[in-house]
Image (tube, rainbow, N blue to C red):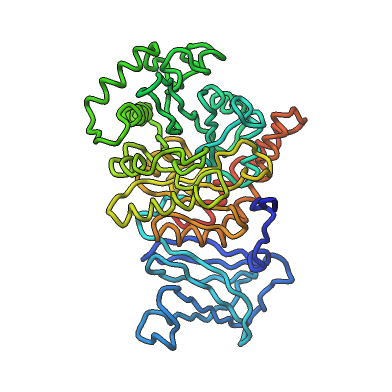
Amino acid sequence: MATIKSKLELPLKDALRNYDIFPKVVVAGRETEITVKPLGWHSAFQANVCHNVALCPLDEGQRWEYPERNNKHALEVTPDADGCIRFCFRFFGEQEFYVRINDGGSFKLQLSVFCVAEDLAGRYPFRGDLHMHTRRSDGKQAPAIVAANYRKTGYDFTVISDHRRYYPSLEAIDAYKDVPTEFTIVEGEEVHLPKGGIGRSNDVHIVNFGGSYSINALVEGSENEKERGSDPSVRSTIPNPPPVRSEEAFFTEIESYADTLVIPEGIERFTYACCHWTFNEIKKGGGLGIFCHPYWLSNVLQVPPAFVDYMMETHPFGAFEVLGGENYFEQNGFQTLQYYEDRAKGRRYPIVGSTDSHNSCNARNSHICSTIVFAPENTRESLVRSIEEFYSVAVDTISDEPRFVGEMRFVRYACFLENEYYALHDELCFEEGRAMKDYICGVEGAKETLAFLHGRMKAQREKYFAF
């Protein structure tokens, strides 16, 4: 089996190696100054020569085929004293613009700028993973190492979502509390509540992303309790989380909860009620409840499609894991079809993509999927709120050529970012992730390196996004 390449192994476009263009993302209707900077004397523009800059909106067609459309924009620009070409333009529509430059008649290069609508102004693209595992459950590496490895790969945020355990996410967060990083580690867990025999079972997998307390630890006997006790400090980020109840009290509570719901014939009453209760508890804790991989082939399909369809109709979850951690077609393919067919039926719910990885190194599924969230800040609260507000795209990186799932406007934007932004972004992530790993491994000077690197991601965002 071929090894999946990480994004850092994929080639950077030649134009981006030789020229910098900024900002890369502008807001429709705002006149914006664009700078094109040569990266080295070999790429220099001819001084005192008038250069033609053609701005080609992708959505307006060829100018000779659609002459009545707004597709003819050309400027004459002479490089400034510092060698950069600068021009101002009022971009329009929500679309990509090719920026084509020639120097006195011969074509020189093509770069790109993306124009977004007002609602995306102030929302930056943060890429992350909302479902992964460490050695604390059935993964390979320690939580802090997993976090560092994913930072190296180009992630802006992640959650440690070990099976039945909340404390590993707190462990990862605590590991970096004394050093500055621009990587966000979100508290969380994968929820597996007790089963009580026939009619009292629930094997639907749910991730608690960012909830302020553990759902697993709400019931006595959880692995979180067995391994770390029941003190609030190991099962929550708040001083007074909900009390722990016995298994029997939990079963009684779910039965009573089911009485408050509409559950049709053919849908497992306890299972659906338990899912609904879990999603509600996650939301009460300020988190995002994620409905995970129902088309996973676990002997057979993990969740019956009729049950999945009712979940989609009522969508008690915060987000649907439309892309997950397997590379056969049935899982992600069926889930993607479910999503688009639901959209055709008028059902709308937020989506995410996650690795569900158990190995943070370059193993088979370690970089298989991710999520781009368009959020004002890279914080737990902002990420959760932005996903709930539908500002997310799921990214499939099973093959070298990424595939995207989501609403059309966000997918188009994500494609631009993949081609024009993320390779540059990922270089900075790699350096910080390597220093994070050095710090955890006790390498001398790592703390100072992290302090030196701190702030570069923010500066890059402010440079490339004209918000």
Towards the viewer: 70 or 151: 151
Say which residue appears at 37% left-offset and 48% top-offset: 390
Say which residue appears at 57% left-offset and 62% top-offset: 419
Towards the viewer: 64 or 77: 64
Residue 414 position in % (x across, y down): 49, 57
Residue 51 position in % (x across, y down): 58, 81
**Would you say 390 lies left or right of 360 here?**
left
**Quarter of the view holding residue 410:** bottom left
Residue 274 position in % (x across, y down): 35, 27
Check the picture and name the quadrant holding the C terminus: bottom left
**Would you say 395 lies left or right of 148 here?**
left
**Quarter of the view holding residue 430:** top right
Residue 459 position in % (x across, y down): 56, 49
Towards the viewer: 403 or 46: 403
Towards the viewer: 456 or 293: 293
Say which residue appears at 57% left-offset and 64% top-offset: 21
**Quarter of the view holding residue 309:** top left
In the picture as drawn, the residue positioned furthest to the right comes out as: 444
Q: Please say if 421 is above or below 95.
A: above
Total of numbered circles in the picture?
Answer: 0
Say which residue appears at 67% left-offset and 64% top-offset: 17
Q: Please say if 317 is above or below 400.
A: above
